[in-house]
Image: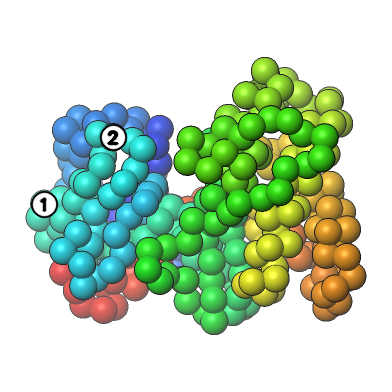
Amino acid sequence: MRIGALEAGGTKMVCAIGNEDGEILQQITIPTETPEITMPQLISYFADKEIEAMGIGCFGPIDLNRDSETYGFITTTPKLAWRNYDIVGAFKESLHIPVGFDTDVNGSALGEATWGITRGLKNSMYITIGTGVGTGIISNGALLHGMLHPEGGHLLLTRHPNDSFEGACPYHKTCLEGLAAGPAIFARWGKNGAELAEKNEVWELEAYYIGQALVNYIMTLSPERIVLGGGVMHQEQLLPLIRQEVKRQLGGYIETKEIGDMEHYIVRPGLCDNQGIMGALKLGFDEFQLGLV
């Protein structure tokens, strides 16, 4: 079957047509502007593609409670033009097909769990570290939802003893996003990550904070594998440092075969940066299976 997929990000919208096997048949990118400008372009792209369902992995926060009056809405996003916008309703009204919906990072977690590096595992995490930090969690074989959806990028951390940086998050200062995302790197060091590639102290500090967060996730969620993606992780030297920090900060408390094999436990994405759009295909297919329009 033909499925539409949308990876809705703060700067760009990735649109694709694919199928239930995760095969991407065509793909385009549309800049994220206001709903008034962007949505007609998105709807126009999908309108003549003969799709039977659609999946959306979306920046958040979003409302995933099907019993809520605002299910399918982008809610308290800092992207003010999109605040309280009914993105699912807009596509349903225009296309008259089932529309699956989740966070963009849950979409990436689902893509990897369905076709990628966490396939076959019942418990895994996908973490993107870039302009912000997002976490997608597969728990007992299903995406984790609850009161809202995981916002693990705002996990509060203990500042490194030698770090005086106040934190870049406007809400929490010293959360993972505030201490380790791309804007935090720039605010702390005055340059972006690519310009700091040779500065060991930058990546040792990054590894300290990311490693601390991962230890907290390991203790609370007990994932069988952790996938790290996003622009900050493009620094090749960072992943080995994170593995070392996780081992050090665990302090020998947890000893499992996974912890003993860090190179296969904390890993890079396995789907060549297509995990988000492939996850959206799976969201669309699952919604079609439910028969909900």
Q: Earlier in the sequence, mark 1 or mark 2?
A: 2
Q: Is residue 246 left or right of residue 186?
A: right
Is residue 233 positioned above or below 262 on the image?
above
Task: Residue 109 in the image: state x and y as whole percent.
Answer: 53, 62
3D distance between C-alphas at marks 1 and 2: 24 Å
Q: Does residue 130 appear in this view?
A: no
At numbered mark 1, what does the secondary structure look like: helix, strand or loop? helix
Compared across the picture, whether 76 is left or right of 213 comes to left
Q: Is residue 4 left or right of residue 196?
A: left
From where the camera sits, is residue 227 visible? yes
**Residue 165 in which image quadrant:** top right
Q: Position of residue 53 (x, y in %)?
A: 25, 64
Q: Quadrant of the N terminus?
A: bottom left
In terms of depth relative to the viewer, which is nearer, 180 or 125?
A: 180
Label annotation for residue 80 = 2
Q: Residue at x 68, y 42 (%)?
A: 233
Q: Position of residue 66 (x, y in %)?
A: 24, 71
Residue sitting at x 47%, y 71%: 144
Q: Amino acid at mark 2?
A: Leu
Q: Quadrant of residue 29?
A: top left
Q: Which residue is mark 1?
A: 94
Q: So how many labels did they put on this image?
A: 2
Three-letter amino acid code at the position of disc 1:
Ser
